[in-house]
Image (cartoon, rainbow, N blue to C red):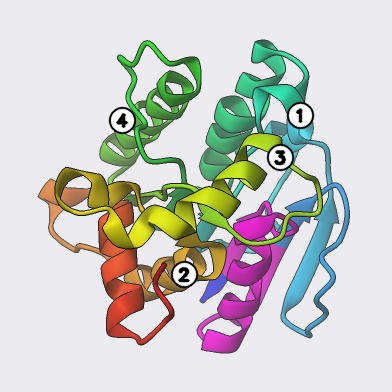
Amino acid sequence: MNAAIIGATGLVGQHLLQKLIDCGRYRHIWVLGRTPPALTHPSLVFTATKLNQLAHLTPPFAIDHSFCALGTTIKQAGSQAAFVAVDQRAVIDFVTLCDAKYSAVVTALGADANSKVFYNRVKGETEAALKLWAHDRQKQLQCYQPSLLLGKRKQSRLAEDIGQTLLPRIAPFMFGKWAKYRPIRAEQVAEAIVHFSANPPSDSSSYATTIDNAAMLALANANAYPVI
């Protein structure tokens, strides 16, 4: 099989790329981005590209599984329109470009096309568009919805930095309806993607499924990963 990944230099993406290599499932892994990943491996095929050029690319080989770990913030993007260009347009362009039989997309906890929160609404609209595409094309899609991500980013995000300091301290006391908001390590998200992508639902009624934060934390706990 062959795979493709975008966002491989990000917090989740860098762990995901390593795990895709380590799992040994893929003969070739097409990596798209502005800069090449720090990792090197004979299976990696890198294409330098800007996000607004994705729709004009041609895959170097047939893609069986695609993995999208793109994500930014309005502050980093510079405007709401620029945020949409990354977290919605580029995500959709990548998935449709690869046209893989299975696609994994990292979105966010709270993604809801009807949300009054702009960030959540964009994430939800992206999921809705991809789910419609998956159904129409009869492809398998899994949307991963992590809570606050823990890990060291190359670029600081003030709100996340504060959350990474405070939330791990109160996470042990987050029970019931609050348990799903527990922070999760980026590596745990990557591990969940590799795990669930190995056996996606095969029945036609489940072309698109959601893997929520609770499911990823449960898998991490079962695999003896340190859970916050």
Choose the circle earlier in sequence order: 2 or 3. Answer: 3
- In reply to whether residue 191 is colored magenta, the answer given is no
> Gap in Å between the C-alphas at discs 2 and 4?
28 Å
C-beta proximity under 8 Å, tags 1 and 3: yes
- In reply to whether residue 29 is colored magenta, the answer given is yes
> Gap in Å between the C-alphas at discs 1 and 3?
8 Å
Front in this rendered view, residue 149 or 199? 149
SS at mark 2? helix
Q: Which residue is drawn at 57% across and 71% down?
A: 2
User: Badge 3 is on which residue?
Assistant: 157
User: Badge 4 is on which residue?
Assistant: 132
State the image coordinates of residue 67 (x, y, percent, origin top left).
Answer: 53, 57
User: Badge 1 is on which residue?
Assistant: 76
Choose the circle earlier in sequence order: 4 or 1. Answer: 1
User: Badge 2 is on which residue?
Assistant: 188
The kind of residue on which mark 2 rests is Gln
SS at mark 4? helix
Q: Residue at x 13, y 58 (%)?
A: 203
State the image coordinates of residue 82 (x, y, percent, origin top left).
Answer: 71, 18
Span shown in magenta? 3-30
Choose the circle earlier in sequence order: 3 or 4. Answer: 4
Q: Which residue is drawn at 52% across and 49% down?
A: 166
The kind of residue on which mark 3 rests is Arg
- Dot in front, 2 or 4: 2
Figure quadrant of residue 44: bottom right
- Dot in front, 4 or 1: 1
